[in-house]
Image (tube, rainbow, N blue to C red):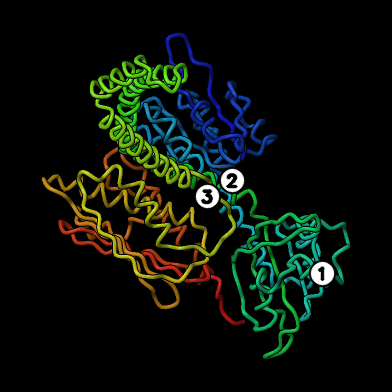
Amino acid sequence: MRILVVQPRPSPGCADLGIAGALARLGSEAEVEVLHDPAAAPARLAAMDPDLVVLDSDVGPVLEALLGELRLGGPPAVVVSAEAGEAVALRAFRAGAADCVTAGADLAEILPVAALEQIRRFREQRRRRSERELARRVDELERTNEHIIQNMNSALLVVDDRGRISFANPSAESILDVEAGGLRGRSVWDWFPESPREAPHLARTLAEGVRFRGAEGMLQRPDGSLIPIGISCAPLAVAEDAAPGAVAIFQDLSEIKQLQRQVLQTEKMASIGQLAAGIAHEINNPMGFVHANLSQMGEYLDDLRRVWERVEALRKALHAGDATPDPAAGEELAGLDRLAAEVDADFLLEDFDKAIRESLEGAERVRHIVQDLRAFSHQGSEESAESDINQCLDSTANIVWTMMKHHVVLTKEYRELPRVRCRPMQLKQVFMNLLINAYQAIEARGEGGHGEIRLRTEPWDGGVRIRVEDNGTGIAPDHLDRIFDPFFTTKEVGVGMGLGLSTCFNIVRRHGGSLHAESEPGRGTCFEVRLPLDGRSREEDGMRG
C-alpha cells in the first residue's frame, strides 16, 4: 500500500507532528513518501497513484484546493491537525477530507488505524465500481465483451460442464501463471487438484446450477504455490433446467489477506498489552519463592559441605588404620555426630528436598504461563484444522485469569464437543476480546466484592455453541445494535478504539458462524458464539440460478 504525506517543513519553534513516524508502525508493507512541497502534490499524485494521502493541516491555502481535487476521484485524504476541536474537523470534512485526526499523544496509535480503514474502504470502493461496471455492460456483452474482458482487472474463465476451459482473459492467465493462449482446452481442475473439496463453489455451480457471489477459495499454481481468491460463479445456461457450463470471475486476495493478518495481529497484541500487569504479577510470585529457595539451598549446601568434609576425614582415617580399631577414626566419628546434630542434618535434607520440589513447581507454573502467552501471540497459520474448542477457550481463559483473579469468580461449564474445522488462533482472539470485555464491564460496575464470569459450551444443531456471560454493567438497548460496528465504543478515551467486537464478528462470520449479544443494563451481558463443524460460511450457499 502506497501513502503520500504532504507536510511542509516545520518552521523554527514548531514541533514536527510525527506523521511519518506514526505511519511507520504499519510495517514494511506500507510505502510512505513525504512531500515537503505542497505545490508539487498534484503532479506527484498522478505519478505515484497512492492508496491514501495524509495532509498536515498547516499546508495552508493549498490544502482546500488539493482536497477538492481528491474529492473528484482521487484516493481518500486524512488530515492531521495540531489543533483539536469540532471546528477544525468540520472544515476538513467540508473541504473533502475522509477523516481528521488530532496530533495528540496517541497519534501513533490512532493514525495507523485510520489509515488502514481508509485504504480498505478505498480498495473496496474500487472493487465494487469494477463489479458494477461489469454488471452494467451485461446487455452489450455480445458486441463489447472482447474489449471489456481483455482489459478487466479480475480474472474470468468460461468452462463447460466437464470443467474444460473455453475462454480465459489475460488476468486469468496471469493469476494461473500460464502463458497467453495456454488455458483453452485445459481442465480447470488442474488448479484445484483436490476438487471439489478445494473448489466447492465452481463444482456446485456446474453440478447444481448454484450461483455464488464473493465467496473465498484457494487455487494452486503449477509451481505448487497456493493463492487465496475471491470467486463469483454463475451457470452458463442455454435452456431451462440446463447447465452446460459456468462463468467464474475471481481475484487474487493475497494482499488483502496479508492486510487482514496485520490488523488481526495488531488487535491480538493490544489485548495482550492489557494483560501485561496481571501476567507480570502471576510470574513474579513463583519466581519470588524460587529465588528464596535457591538462596536457602545455597546455605544448606555450605552445611552439607562441612558434613562431607568430616565424612572424608573419617574415610581417610579408616583407610589409614589396620584391623585394630583406630582412635583417630573414633574421634572423627564423634566429630561427625556433633556436626550432624549442629546442622540438624535430617531437617536439612528434608527441607532441601522440599525446596527443590517447590522450585520445580514454580518453574513449571511460569513455563505454562509463557507457553499460553506465546501460543496466543503467535500469528498462526491461515490453514484451518480440526480443533478442540474447549481447549481453545480454556487456554485463553488461563491467560486472562491472571488479570482478573482477584476480582472475578470464573465458572466453567464445558460439555463434550465434536471437533470443529477452524483457524484456532483466530477463535482465541475472539474469546480473548469477549473475556476482557466481560472483566471491564464488571470493573465498571464499581461495587465491592467479586463479579462473576461464566463460560459455557455445548453441542449445537450442526455445530457448537459458546457462551460468555458476566454480571457487569450491561449494554444500553440503543447501543446493542451498534456494538459490532467498527470504531463504535462506549469506553473512555484511551481504553478502546471500537475494533475488538467488530474483529470478533468478522472472524466468526468467516468461520460460517454467528455472534449475538443479549444484555440488560445493570444485570450483565451474554455473548453467544455459534460455529458450524465444517467452518464453511453460510454466505457461500448462494441461490440457484
Q: From the viewer's side, name the closer residue of 316 and 516.
A: 316
Query: Residue 447: x, y in percent?
Result: 11, 46
Query: Residue 11: x, y in percent?
Result: 48, 12
Of the numbered discs 1 and 3, the one sitting upstream in the chain is 3
Pointer 2 residue: 73
| Mark 3 and mark 2: Cα distance apart in space | 14 Å
Specify the amino acid type for callout 3.
Arg
Q: From the viewer's side, name the closer residue of 413 and 150.
A: 413
Secondary structure under tag 1 reads strand
Pointer 1 residue: 167
Secondary structure under tag 2 reads loop
Of the numbered discs 3 and 2, the one sitting upstream in the chain is 2
Q: Nearer the observer, disc 2 or disc 1?
A: 1
* Residue 276 in view of the camera: no
Q: Are marks 3 and 2 in contact (CB under 8 Å)?
A: no
| Mark 1 and mark 3: Cα distance apart in space | 32 Å
| Mark 2 and mark 1: Cα distance apart in space | 33 Å
Secondary structure under tag 3 reads helix
Specify the amino acid type for callout 1.
Phe
Pointer 3 residue: 121
Give the image quarter of residue 313. Answer: top left
